[in-house]
Amino acid sequence: MGKSAAVCDQKTEFEIVRDWNGFQQVLLRVPSGASARKKNESFFQVCLYGGQIISWRNERGEELLFTSCKANLKPPKALRGGVSIYFPQFGHYGSLEQHGFTRNKMWSIDCDPPALHPNDSNGKACLDLLLKPLDAELKSWPHCFEFRLRVSLSMDGDLTVISRVRNINGKPFSFSFAYHTYFSVSDISEVRVEGLETLDYLDNLCQENVLRSKEMR
Ligand SMILES: O=P(O)(O)OC[C@H]1O[C@@H](O)[C@H](O)[C@@H](O)[C@@H]1O
């Protein structure tokens, strides 16, 4: 089914498909490179359940995200794979279930999102999603918010994710959020994470789970 979304600087065509559970997924394709030949295209696929990005392919057809073939979406459990959106809590650092609740909610397509700075959008095809809590959900986390998620893809196949959280009633609240990304890698022994050397961190594998500083390493 071809639909068009309100997008950054042009109309972008996207398709809505359903997985075997009947959950809607949005597929957005972008012709790549200057020639924009049809056979060269990158795309991403987002499941409206959880607002989860479950596939991101470059113009060579390579999948950049990992989802195990053993992973099944069985709500209320979230699917392990792709990019999960965690909000309003990361991990167990709060009173809610691990990683908060947004990964277990149905998001909607936002056809009229508030504008972003042009630098964040120009030349990209975008999909805007929106999550608003239902009244019943406010019992577990009594804060009025709107969460907007923009997923965009450039002609070079670069994926950008932007989150915007709006406080609806002006009463202050605090939150944390995360993009929990499962990358597809061909050889895990070759993977390095750089640029974190000077930061303090929490080690989830450590029983005490205390803040560790670089002096402790
Ligand atoms: O297992 P969940 O709740 O889907 O969370 C995903 C992962 O979240 C990470 O933060 C934890 O370190 C992992 O142990 C966990 O598997």
Image (cartoon, grey):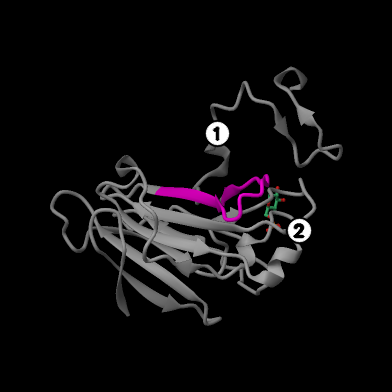
Residue identifier under label 1: 192
From the top left corner, tell me how far across and down residue 124 is, in percent: 29, 51
Marks 2 and 1, how far apart at CA: 30 Å
Residue identifier under label 2: 97
Q: Tell which of 59 and 163 is nearer to you.
A: 163
Q: Amino acid at mark 1?
A: Arg
Q: Which residues are magenta?
A: 160-180
The residue lying furthest to the top in this view is 215
Is residue 174 a member of the stretch shown in magenta?
yes
Q: Amino acid at mark 2?
A: Glu
The residue lying furthest to the right in this view is 208
CB at mark 2 closer than 8 A to ligand 1?
Answer: no
Residue 63 shown left or right of residue 12 in the figure: right
Residue ID at (59%, 57%):
145
Residue ID at (63%, 66%):
104
Does 39 appear above or below 210?
below
Assess disc 1: are there few (<14), some (14-19) or many (≥20) residues with their C-alpha within 10 Å of its C-alpha: few
From the top left corner, tell me how far across and down residue 48 is, in percent: 50, 69
Does 110 appear above or below 19?
above
Residue ID at (61%, 62%):
103
- The answer, for residue 117, to whether it is visible in the render is yes
For marks 2 and 1, the one nearer the N-term is 2
